[in-house]
Every structure is written in C-alpha cells, then in structure tokens.
Image: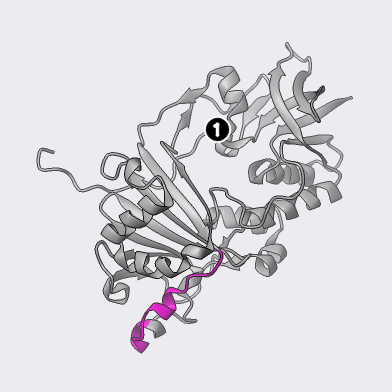
Amino acid sequence: MTHAVAILGGGLAGLTLALQLRQEHASLPITVLERRVGAAPEAAFKVGESTVEIGAAYFGKVLGLKAHLNAEQIVKFGFRFFFSEGRSDLDRCDELGASKPLPTGAWQIDRGRFENFLARLARERGITVVAGAAVKRVEFGDADEPHLVHFLRDGEPQSLSARWVVDAAGRAGLLKRQLGLAQANGHEANAVWWRHSEHLVPDDWSEDATWRARCVPPERWRSTNHYVGDGYWVWLIPLASGSHSVGIVCDAKTHPLATMKTFELAMQWLHAHQPGIAQRLEPLRDKLQDFAFFRDFSYGCKQVFSPQRWALTGEAGLFLDCLLYTSPSPRD
C-alpha cells in the first residue's frame, strides 16, 4: 500500500500537521512514524512551552483544540518583562506586561500532556501512528513514483511507500542531513533550561499591596515571565503538571555557555546577574527535575519544501527564536 503522506516524527509538529491534513482530507491515508514507545512524560523536556498568539490561534481555532487547552493546560497571562539585572527587589524593577487578561488568549503548554492528547486524537481520527519507528533514510522516487521510507522497529528493518514525505523529527533533521540542507543564520545564541516540581509564584514575592494589585487577577505566575539584562533573558514558564520551567537564553559572545552549562554553574550565573531569581530558586534545589543546554540553538535551512514531494516542518526545518539585544562595545 502506498500512503498519501508519511510524517517522520510524532511530536507537536508532526501530529498537528496530521490532524490538519485529516481535517481537510477525510479519507487521506496518513502515517506518522514516531521513535518513542509509550506515552511522553508530563513536563516533557522539550523547547516550546509558551505559545504566542498566532500559535495559540492555530491550536485553538484552526485545529479546534480550545476545550483541551482551557481544561488541561494553563491559560497564559501574556508575556511579562522585568528589567532586573543585578536586582533582588523584583517588585521595584521596571515591569512591562499586561494588567488584565488579553482578549486574544494563549496557553502555557505542558508538551508531554499535549502530545499524548494529540496522539490519542490522531488515532481516533483514523491516522496511523507507528510507535518505536526509528527512521534511517528516505529513498526518493523518480517522477510520480512513490518514495520509500526505511526504518527500524523492534530491531527489524521495515519500509513503507508514500507519495509525500514530511520530516517533523525536530532537531534530528533527518531530511536536512540526507539532502544537505543545513544553513547557519548568524544568530549566535545558546540556552540552558531546567524544571522544578513546584510552581514559582512571583505575586507572592512582594508584600507591596499596590504592586500585587496591578494585575487583575493578581496572577503574574501564569505569564511567561522574563527577567532581562544585557544580552540575555531568564524565563519562568508554569506547566499544568505542577512543574515550572526555568531557562536562560543568551548571546553566545556576551555570556559564554561555559559559564552556565551545568545546574550549579547556572545558579552561580543567576546569583551574579539575577540574584532575586537565584534567591527564590535556592530552596527548590531538592525539586530539580532535569537540566539541559543547547549550543547555537538557532539555525536556518536552504529549502523546506519541494515539488519532488517532500517537506520539512517545525524544528526539522529552521528555528530562530527572539532576537537578543546587547549593548554595543565602545569600539563599535
């Protein structure tokens, strides 16, 4: 059997694409090949927990997932920025953020919980999701001939044919590597991040009733909170599973990865640059769940789709993230 579409990767990008295709083509044979076996853990260790409004509109309106998002994820209180370099008195820093819920709406996404829901929904809608499939290579067909996807499952080589192949395997970049599509974009930035198994509540970090009452409801903790300095920001993102995501995004030259590539180094860095955050995290050391870093997390891609019936989506293609501001040096 030749499938209409084979999607390589059953994460956020692959499953949402499969659901959108099913929505638009009720009988289209769609197969998703996913390397992982079993459900993803809640508070899964993935980039992309804080949705922006355009992404939220896609999930909520285009795919019709608003009921799940409202019930099983955290409704986001917008982006919030504190200009807090070197400060412990976080309620006295310049703060930029919404004072009441925004009409457009967005969510903080527990990626494990969301992707498990998407996989169940895909199967309910007749999409074939193959777990434990480690894709090795794609043999591209000539002209109108189908492509052949080779993968291992339970250690056994298998293959399937498909008219279209879409790489949604994230940073593994299956087709990008095979076709030589990788491209630097000149945005030299690194990131480290981790999770604690307890929510951080910035609203409780001050006894100033006026400051607390500025937000109605007083729930800054539901925001994506950014604590900003020269060439970096620190994020705090709450997850519906009860975990809280903490990360540092930084210009590679101004703040080298070597200064923060372990949890202990990251805490030292926070004590130097964001002491107010470091002080609030110290009591949560025993609640640390994980830690990771990305070097040069931003990248481009020479091509993301082709009339030869292949495409790349999500992080399998390109990834930018926000631009960082670094003060010019005197010689500039």
Q: Residue furthest front?
A: 286
Q: Residue at x 75, y 30 (%)?
A: 6
Residue 249: x %, y % from top left: 39, 49
Q: Amino acid at mark 1?
A: Gly
Q: Badge 1, how many Cα within 10 Å: few under 14, some, many 20+?
A: many
Residue 180: x %, y % from top left: 53, 18
Q: Quadrant of the N terminus?
A: top right
Identify the colour scheme used.
one colour
* Drawn side of residue 204 relative to residue 31, left or right: left
Q: Residue at x 67, y 44 (%)?
A: 11
Is residue 269 within the magenta segment?
no
Where, by quadrant of the figure, is residue 267 drawn? Answer: bottom left
The vertical placement of 23 against 81, above or below, is above
Number of dots carrying numbers: 1
Q: Residue at x 56, y 22 (%)?
A: 177
Toward the viewer: 213 or 255?
255
What residue is pinned by disc 1?
Answer: 317
Residue 313: x %, y % from top left: 61, 36
Q: Secondary structure at mark 1?
A: loop
Q: Residue at x 48, y 70 (%)?
A: 200
Q: Residue furthest right?
A: 1
Q: Residue furthest top?
A: 142
The vertical placement of 312 against 98, above or below, is above
Where, by quadrant of the figure, is residue 280 drawn? Answer: bottom left
Residue 327: x %, y % from top left: 20, 48
The vertical placement of 285 against 21, above or below, is below
Q: Quadrant of the C terminus?
A: top left
Report the span colored magenta.
197-211
Q: Residue furthest left?
A: 330
Is residue 199 within the magenta segment?
yes
Toward the viewer: 280 or 149?
280
Toward the viewer: 27 or 159?
159
